[in-house]
Image: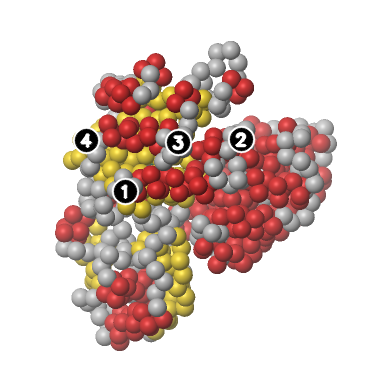
């Protein structure tokens, strides 16, 4: 099965069972300060589980691009990634555990409609319970009646099978499916389904049974209804179906690996000590391409820092493969070629993605070169912190250069100095996240734009992400087709009319529930659900939106609003670039 067929099989299976295919959310959840990146299919759907917002359908399905940085040290093994696509399905207060297990079993084992896995190779895990929450015995029953022998249903502790979406928020016991890839992958005679060596692939979180809202450490409130949240990594399912040794030999990854082979003039797998370097570069290049496509540029804070880190880690690994010269652009091009059909915005952003990556690559190559020269000057007593702090040389690079020269580095001292430096960086990051005064007008322009879109295209249009710079704004919204030139013109005119009216911008302290009841437009994200007091900004009677500000005092402070460009971002999500003069 090709990865394209895996996608289709998953979506069709659930669509046929009345699940609505929903648009992918942006990789950047702009209104959720608790998340740097969308990290699971359920993240953008939290308001549905909490009962704050009605879902467009009780049953949903999608394939959501996700990014996780907590697994960074595992990258290079067979199946962990920074960027990945999560195939997810949901029942929001509809069917429960029994049906979820039945669907999972059918999808996994059915040869005609599903993936046709051999049932003999499947295991499931369920929550064993703890002192706060009961064991999930029901789900054991449902697996056995679906066809899985009882001895292959394993009870696991909270750390494994109590899925939490964050320190607070919807959570519940989960049931996961493991696939036994066979004895040839066993780590030894004691190899078993829970040893984590790679023989037993966790292929599907086949149901998080969202029953609780986690309000603190070991504190759970029952949710008004039970929801089912499932998630399967596309890479992993594809690896099993294509019977590859790891995710990197699948049709999703191998074209990228092959390009690295060409650039490095080395064969992947020939020298096992280099396999990890190949894999890390392939994983990171895929991730950095998707991040750069969001308009993020390398920096020292937050998302920009993640991008910078991925680029730099790749360049360090490239040294191991003896790659000389620039290569990220060529690899990013491969990623865009591989994923462009499914994510068209990658194609439209191609030039800027490649430019951003190559620029950082150039700067970092110079950093390495300069750092090398400084290290050379230091003699026997290498000051790794100075190399890092003043010259930007990563410790791993310093260590390997020191090794080559038969010198040692005091890493303990380095760690100490680093933690002091991190404290300084944290306060700098906090400072950078404050929005400077001058973006006020662009921010107000964004509210006007959102309200204008909802008036012209309908109230089913909602904001799906946003990026604001002093005079430009990028606004993502839910809509399922390209806007006509007339519609764009109408939107632009409607905004400019409100500017001419010089409407007052008012901020009103209210509660989230009240604001929602009054019909205010809000990104129903954690930011607002968690806090008691929220600020509702209104611009005359034209726009009412929850927001953190800052805003212009009246719409007349904007001189002119211009739509520059409209394009697709993902399925069902459009993006407008606009300029605000003022
Ligand atoms: N939210 C769960 C996970 O990320 C299932 O989708 O594993």
Which residue is drawn at the image coordinates 77% and 55% (left, top)?
Answer: 325
Which residue is drawn at the image coordinates 69% and 42% (left, top)?
Answer: 278
For marks 1 and 4 on the same chain, the one whose residue lies earlier in the sequence? 1
Q: Quadrant of residue 141?
A: top left
Residue extending farthest to the top is 189
- Spot occupied by residue 495 in the image (x, y as percentages of width and height): 33, 80
Which quadrant is the N terminus positioned in? top right
Between the residue at mark 1 and the residue at mark 3, the CA separation in whole angstroms equals 21 Å
For marks 1 and 2 on the same chain, the one whose residue lies earlier in the sequence? 1
Q: Is residue 270 left or right of residue 395?
A: right
What residue would you read off at disc 3? 111
Q: Secondary structure at mark 4?
A: strand
Task: Please identify, in this view, whether the residue under mark 2 or under mark 4 is nearer the observer.
Answer: 2
Q: Are marks 2 and 3 in contact (CB under 8 Å)?
A: no
Between the residue at mark 2 and the residue at mark 3, the CA separation in whole angstroms equals 20 Å
Q: Secondary structure at mark 1?
A: loop
Task: Please identify, in this view, whether the residue under mark 3 or under mark 4 is nearer the observer.
Answer: 3
For marks 2 and 4 on the same chain, the one whose residue lies earlier in the sequence? 4
Between the residue at mark 1 and the residue at mark 2, the CA separation in whole angstroms equals 31 Å
What residue would you read off at disc 4? 221
Between the residue at mark 3 and the residue at mark 4, the CA separation in whole angstroms equals 41 Å
Q: Is residue 477 visible?
A: no
For marks 1 and 3 on the same chain, the one whose residue lies earlier in the sequence? 1
For marks 3 and 4 on the same chain, the one whose residue lies earlier in the sequence? 3
What residue would you read off at disc 2? 244
Which residue is drawn at the image coordinates 71% and 50% (left, top)?
Answer: 259
What residue would you read off at disc 1? 19
Q: Which mark is residue 60?
A: none
- Spot occupied by residue 199 in the image (x, y as percentages of width and height): 55, 25
In front here: 445 or 27? 27
Q: Are marks 3 and 4 in contact (CB under 8 Å)?
A: no
């Amino acid at each position: 099965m090709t990865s394209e067929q895996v996608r289709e099989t998953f979506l069709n299976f659930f669509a046929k069972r009345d699940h609505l295919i929903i648009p992918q959310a942006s990789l950047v959840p702009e209104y959720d300060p608790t998340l740097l990146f969308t990290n699971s299919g359920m993240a953008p759907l939290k308001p549905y589980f909490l009962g704050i917002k009605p879902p467009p359908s009780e049953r949903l399905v999608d394939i959501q691009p996700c990014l996780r940085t907590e697994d960074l040290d595992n990258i290079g093994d067979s199946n962990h990634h920074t960027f990945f696509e999560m195939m997810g399905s949901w029942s929001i207060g509809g069917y429960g555990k029994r049906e979820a297990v039945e669907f999972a079993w059918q999808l996994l084992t059915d040869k005609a409609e599903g993936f046709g896995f051999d049932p003999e190779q499947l295991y499931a895990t369920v929550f064993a319970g703890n002192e706060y929450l009961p064991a999930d015995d029901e789900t054991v029953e449902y697996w056995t009646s679906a066809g899985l022998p009882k001895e292959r249903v394993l009870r696991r502790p909270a750390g494994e099978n109590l899925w939490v979406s964050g320190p607070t928020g919807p959570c519940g016991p989960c049931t996961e499916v493991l696939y036994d890839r066979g004895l040839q992958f066993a780590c030894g005679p004691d190899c078993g389904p829970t040893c984590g060596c790679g023989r037993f692939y966790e292929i599907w979180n086949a149901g998080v049974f969202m029953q609780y809202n986690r309000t603190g450490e070991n504190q759970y409130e029952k949710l008004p209804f039970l929801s089912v949240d499932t998630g399967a990594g596309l890479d992993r399912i594809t690896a099993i179906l294509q019977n590859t040794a790891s995710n990197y030999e699948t049709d999703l990854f191998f074209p990228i690996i092959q390009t690295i082979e060409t650039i490095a003039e080395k064969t992947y797998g020939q020298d096992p000590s280099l396999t990890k370097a190949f894999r890390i570069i392939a994983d990171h290049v895929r991730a950095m391409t998707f991040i750069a496509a969001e308009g993020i540029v390398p920096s020292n804070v937050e998302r920009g820092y993640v991008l910078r880190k991925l680029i730099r880690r790749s360049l360090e690994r490239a040294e191991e493969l003896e790659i000389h010269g620039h290569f990220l652009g060529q690899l990013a091009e491969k990623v865009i070629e591989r994923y462009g059909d499914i994510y068209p915005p990658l194609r439209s952003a191609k030039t800027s993605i490649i430019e951003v990556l190559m620029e950082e690559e150039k700067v970092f190559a110079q950093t390495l070169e300069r750092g090398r020269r400084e290290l050379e000057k230091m003699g026997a007593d290498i000051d790794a912190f100075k190399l890092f702090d003043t010259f930007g040389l990563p410790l791993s690079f310093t260590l390997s250069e020191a090794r080559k020269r038969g010198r040692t580095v005091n890493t303990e001292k380095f760690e100490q100095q680093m933690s002091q430096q991190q404290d300084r960086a944290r306060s700098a990051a906090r400072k950078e996240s404050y929005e400077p005064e001058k973006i006020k007008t662009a921010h107000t322009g964004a509210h006007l734009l959102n309200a204008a879109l909802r008036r012209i295209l309908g109230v089913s249009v909602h904001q799906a992400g946003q990026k604001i710079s002093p005079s430009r704004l990028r606004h993502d919204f839910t809509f399922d087709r390209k806007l006509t030139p007339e519609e764009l013109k109408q939107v632009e005119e409607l905004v400019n009319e409100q500017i001419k009216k010089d409407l007052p911008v008012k901020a009103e302290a209210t509660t989230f529930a009240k604001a929602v009841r009054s019909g205010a437009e809000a990104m129903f994200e954690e930011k607002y659900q968690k806090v008691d007091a929220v600020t509702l900004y209104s611009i005359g009677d034209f726009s009412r939106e929850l927001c953190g500000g800052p805003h212009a005092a009246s719409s007349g402070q904007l001189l002119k609003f211009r739509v520059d460009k409209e394009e697709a971002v993902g399925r069902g999500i459009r993006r407008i670039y606009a300029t605000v003069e003022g």
